[in-house]
Image (cartoon, grey):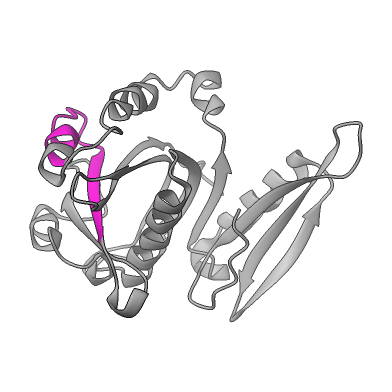
Amino acid sequence: EDGIRDTSVTGVQTCALPISSSGQVEVVLSVRSGQEWVEETASTPVAALARLEALVSGPSANGQRFLSVRQPIAVLFRDKQRYLLGMLQEARSLLGGTDVDAAVRFAASDATGRSSIAIGTPGQDGGRSRWSWQHIGSAIRFYTPEERSRLLGADIRKAPDAEYGEWCAEAYDRAIASGEPLIDDIRALVMRKTGAPVESRYRRLLVPFTGTDGQSIVLVTSYFTPLQQTA
């Protein structure tokens, strides 16, 4: 991870650090606690995953509403996720240069309705980019059809859950900075304008593009997994 410790960030960052020539690793979790980041170290990846599961088992109770773990692209082959692999392979054909309209057509052609397109506009005085959606997949259940229509072209942070929008915008910034597809396993509790919050667990693929006019474009597509029920 990039090690950001910004006070506006909510969530967990992880990194694996080699500690011996035997190939053993320890996993460092940076966990947001109130207004501070607290480092926790797990002796094995299994222990780290157990700690993450504990953190996300009650996101509304412990304040960690958005948690993510970076994954290598190899997990798509390991888990035989043909949908994400197919989207990645097709999207890569656009990496040589595309425009927003072509990117939107590509996302809209996804029959599953899981793909969205976000574009970034440079901030004033070199500040952070302003991200907006140009296409929102119909299967994204965080929003009603009316909300999806209203959010097109609007600042992502004007979503019903502004914190979730800000968290997504930070991920898109990282994708553009990396210049490479990013895969994260995510668990999120997203607030809605009306009705109960939506808790989701999903694997997210971000594919960054640079448009023919220099525009920052990110393809966002996800594979949702069932939540484990707790007693």
Which residue is at a point 51% across and 30% down the rendered structure image? Answer: 73
Q: Given the current orientation, which residue lies at the most extreme front position?
A: 213
Image: magenta residue range: 104-120
Which residue is at a point 42% across and 49% down the rendered structure image? Answer: 175
**Residue 91 relative to residue 64: left or right:** left
Viewer-nearest residue: 199 or 83: 83
Residue 99 x/y as whole percent: 16, 43
Residue 225, located in which quarter of the rendered image? top left
**Residue 45 relative to residue 114: left or right:** right
Which residue is at a point 91% across and 39% down the rendered structure image? Answer: 20
Is-magenta flag for residue 118? Answer: yes
Q: Is residue 86 above or below residue 228?
A: above
**Residue 197 relative to residue 73: left or right:** left
Residue 178 x/y as whole percent: 48, 48
Residue 121 x/y as whole percent: 24, 64
Total residue callouts: 0
Which residue is at a point 49% across and 43% down the rendered structure image? Answer: 184
Residue 157 x/y as whole percent: 28, 70
Q: Is residue 210 above or below residue 194?
A: above
Is-magenta flag for residue 199? Answer: no
